[in-house]
Image: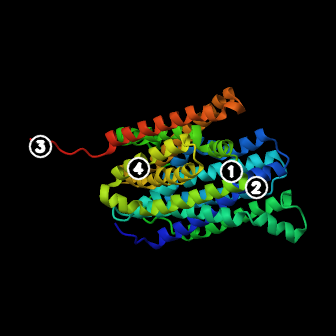
């Protein structure tokens, strides 16, 4: 393994970091911004979910576009649409414009999603593919940590400059506009990447653009991810509610906890290539994911705040760090024509599993009411642990190379 990458890859990584900063700003302030617009909780939830829903719905059509335009042109188109959607959202005066911005963002995200991994795979070899996928995720999560630290200062600075309250629409909108600037800066390196030479575009009308050459391998790669999504969606989106209810800590402490969790993930991702050298790609994935299970148990059931915080950092770092290695493994094993389809199906399976589990979790907790919230979480954590364990078993059985039997 080595960490030497081409100029095209370094341009892509620069764009990833800038986009990560913009996403951190957006995630930190979007709900406050929508509230300042006067939108109720239901509309806020819809606008939050719409980009992921649109990405899941159009992921397969996005594969056709990627095969027609190739990865670099698809990255450029997706990046532009993501920035345009963010700008529409930042300039919204009500629900209609906010929904339109979220929809455009979802389309752009789908195009970026189906082209990023195939682009990185095409630009690397077996020696530097895992380091690249790990570095790209580390930059995204590191940018998220930095964005959370810096983003919190923007409304206050604007409020002092303009003489308005820090929670006013103008102050929060300033933070969203800064996110637009970071995403716009991220498009510049993307447009400096030259298009792939000597690669004729595929016919847009060819039905075989959606065909999968290795259906068995594709299924073995996707099904474990479905199980992870079904498990994670039940508890991970609601960890803030769980920790606040269990230990009665304030929002500032919660923000710090989740910010440092992102940094821990970035650090763990960077040591993944070393683990891969020792164990191999898929064994490294199973090893780090399995190591996260005891911390997930501790997170869900420990009465000690210190142990829960330790588990929050460690579980997230271990579980999320396996993602880039698994993607690199899939890109290495799949035929080149199947790579965009894997990116689409992998994201779809995750989003659908996550959404179903998150919806079920909300309904399940409502039966217990506020007084029984922690009891409900006890059952939900058991479900998450079961889904994670099943995913790891299937990954090991289906994807870890078997030793040849001796005669």
Residue 208 is situated, as x and y percent measured from the top left of the image, at 43, 42
Q: Mark 1 highlights which residue?
A: 104
What is the x, y in percent for residue 213?
Answer: 37, 43
Measured Cα–Cα span from mark 4 to mark 1:
27 Å
- How far apart in space, not on screen, are marks 1 and 2 (Cα)? 9 Å
Q: Are marks 1 and 2 in contact (CB under 8 Å)?
A: yes
Q: Say which of marks 3 and 1 sits in front.
A: 3
Nearer-N-terminus badge (4/2): 2
Q: Residues within 10 Å of mark 3 (few under 14, many from 20)?
A: few
Does residue 45 sit above or below 19 in this rendering?
above
Q: Residue 88 carries which label?
A: 2
Q: Specify the quadrant of the image occupied by residue 186.
A: bottom right
Q: In the rendered view, does 362 fall on the left or right side of 16?
A: right
Q: Which of marks 3 and 1 is nearer the N terminus?
A: 1
The residue carrying mark 4 is 337
Q: Say few, some or many: other residues with alpha carbon within 10 Å of mark 2 (under 14 / 14 to 19 / 20 or more).
A: some
Of tags 2 and 3, which is closer to the observer?
A: 3
C-alpha gap between disc 4 and disc 3: 36 Å
Residue indicated by mark 3: 406
Q: Is residue 197 in view from this perspective?
A: yes
Sequence-earlier tag: 2 or 3: 2
């Amino acid at each position: 393994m080595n960490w030497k990458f081409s100029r095209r890859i370094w341009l892509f990584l620069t764009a990833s970091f800038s986009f990560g900063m913009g996403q951190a700003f957006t995630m930190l302030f979007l709900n406050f911004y929508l509230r300042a617009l006067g939108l109720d909780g239901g509309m806020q939830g819809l606008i939050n979910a719409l980009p992921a829903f649109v990405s899941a719905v159009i992921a397969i059509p996005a594969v056709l576009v990627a095969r027609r335009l190739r990865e670099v042109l698809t990255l450029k188109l997706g990046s532009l649409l993501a920035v345009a959607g963010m700008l529409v959202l930042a300039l919204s005066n009500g629900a209609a414009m906010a929904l339109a911005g979220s929809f455009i963002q979802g389309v752009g995200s789908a195009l970026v999603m189906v082209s990023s991994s195939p682009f990185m795979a095409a630009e690397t070899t077996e020696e530097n593919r895992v380091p690249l996928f790990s570095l790209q995720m580390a930059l995204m999560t590191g940018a998220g940590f930095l964005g959370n630290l810096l983003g919190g200062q923007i409304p206050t600075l604007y409020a002092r400059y303009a003489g308005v309250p820090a929670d006013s629409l103008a102050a929060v909108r300033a933070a969203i506009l800064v996110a637009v600037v970071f995403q716009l800066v991220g498009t510049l390196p993307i447009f400096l990447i030259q298009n792939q030479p000597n690669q004729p575009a595929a016919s847009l009308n060819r039905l075989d653009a959606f065909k999968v050459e290795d259906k068995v391998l594709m299924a073995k790669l996707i099904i474990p991810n479905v199980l992870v999504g079904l498990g994670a969606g039940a508890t991970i989106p609601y960890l803030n509610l769980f920790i606040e209810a269990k230990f009665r800590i304030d929002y500032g402490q919660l923000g710090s906890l989740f910010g440092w969790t992102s940094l821990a993930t970035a650090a763990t991702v960077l040591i993944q290539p070393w683990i891969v050298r020792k164990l191999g790609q898929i064994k490294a994935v199973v090893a780090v994911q399995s190591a996260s299970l005891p911390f997930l148990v501790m997170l869900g059931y420990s009465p000690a705040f210190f142990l829960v915080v330790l588990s929050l950092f460690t579980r997230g770092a271990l579980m999320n760090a396996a993602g880039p290695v698994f993607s690199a493994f899939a890109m290495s094993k799949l035929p080149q024509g199947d790579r965009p389809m894997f990116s689409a199906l992998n994201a779809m399976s995750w989003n659908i599993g996550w959404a179903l589990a998150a919806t079920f979790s909300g309904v399940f907790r409502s039966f217990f009411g506020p007084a029984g919230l922690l009891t409900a979480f006890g059952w939900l954590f058991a479900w998450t642990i079961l889904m994670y364990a099943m995913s790891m078993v299937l990954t090991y059985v289906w994807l870890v190379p078997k030793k040849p039997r001796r005669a």
